[in-house]
Amino acid sequence: MLGPPADVIAIRKEIDAFFKTTADDGNKIGSHKWGIYAFFDYDGEPIYVGQTYEGLGSRIGRHLNNQRTDAVAMNVLDPFEVAEIRVWPLDVSAIPKEQRRNYLDRAEFTVFQKVIAESKLGAILNEKPPRPSQVIELPKSYARRIIPADIFPHRKHPDIRIARRAATIASLARRISERSVKRGLRTTLLTQAKRLEGLAEARLNDFPEGAEDEDQEQD
């Protein structure tokens, strides 16, 4: 039986290697049940933030291996666009059980505010932003680029990303047109459109005015 493409296998190996990396507390990063994660694209732009109390490794794996998380299924997040993962493992052992979910929410809100400040657009793709709460002092984060060096230039190529992003927008817009949705999903659509516009504009600047289009037919 034919397996996944070689680039997919290589990326999965990078993700697996990241999860097996030992954190400062002596535990593997992916084994932490509680934590916050953020995804970044090929330009270092933050695109998505999430939380988990079921395991960083399993939760992120579901996102990136197309195992039908809501964000992927709704065309909010295209796993192809994720070039880097950053995680904040949380130690909740000293926190009373009834307060742990609140602590997790506060940590997510803190990370959300952090990456929004880092974003050139001042926006990311989350359909439902975290509930506003008091920020906390975040624990140490761990990050890794999950795209191998030999694959990165091809995947970062703007023409490929423009096509992918346009297809994602079309799919998301179709879903919106077929059902009653809340404002959050329409905000995500707008953010995706702005991301596409920025990428398309940067690509256009690669072709100065007056320069001949390589694809122009010759008389």
Image: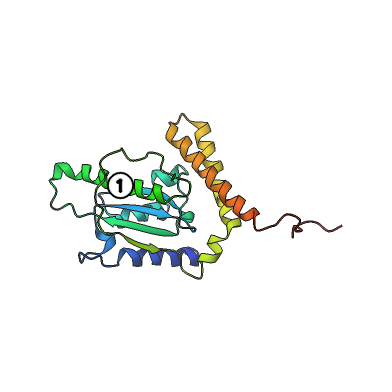
Q: Quick one: quadrant of the C terminus? A: bottom right
For residue 55, which quarter of the picture? bottom left
Expressed as whole percent of the image width and height from the top left, the position of residue 70 reads 39, 43
Question: Based on the displayed image, in which of its 4 quarters is residue 10 positioned?
Answer: bottom left
How many marks are shown on the rendered structure?
A: 1
Compared to residue 77, the image places residue 82 above or below, namely below
**Which of the two residues, 28 or 61, is positioned nearer the viewer here?**
28
Lateral position of residue 98 relative to residue 53, left or right: left
Could you say where residue 52 lies in the image, as x and y percent from the top left? Answer: 28, 49
Would you say residue 68 is visible in this rendering?
A: no
Q: Residue at x 65, y 53 (%)?
A: 204
Residue found 55% across the figure and 51% down from its top: 164
- Extreme-right residue of the structure: 219
Residue at the extreme top:
180
Residue 89: percent from left, percent from top: 26, 56
In the displayed structure image, the side of residue 205 where residue 81 appears, left or right: left
Structural crowding at the residue carrying mark 1, measured as other residues with C-alpha within 10 Å and reported as few (<14), some (14–19) or many (≥20): many
Q: Residue at x 35, y 64 (%)?
A: 16
Q: Measured along the vertical axis of the image, is residue 56 above or below residue 127?
A: below
**Residue at position x 31%, y 44% in the image:** 109
Report if residue 204 is visible in the image: yes
Judge by depth and name the residue closer to the eye, 201 or 149: 201
Q: Is residue 13 left or right of residue 197?
A: left
**Residue holding disc 1:** 110
Q: Callout 1: helix, strand or loop?
A: helix
Closer to us: 122 or 107: 122
Q: Amino acid at mark 1?
A: Thr
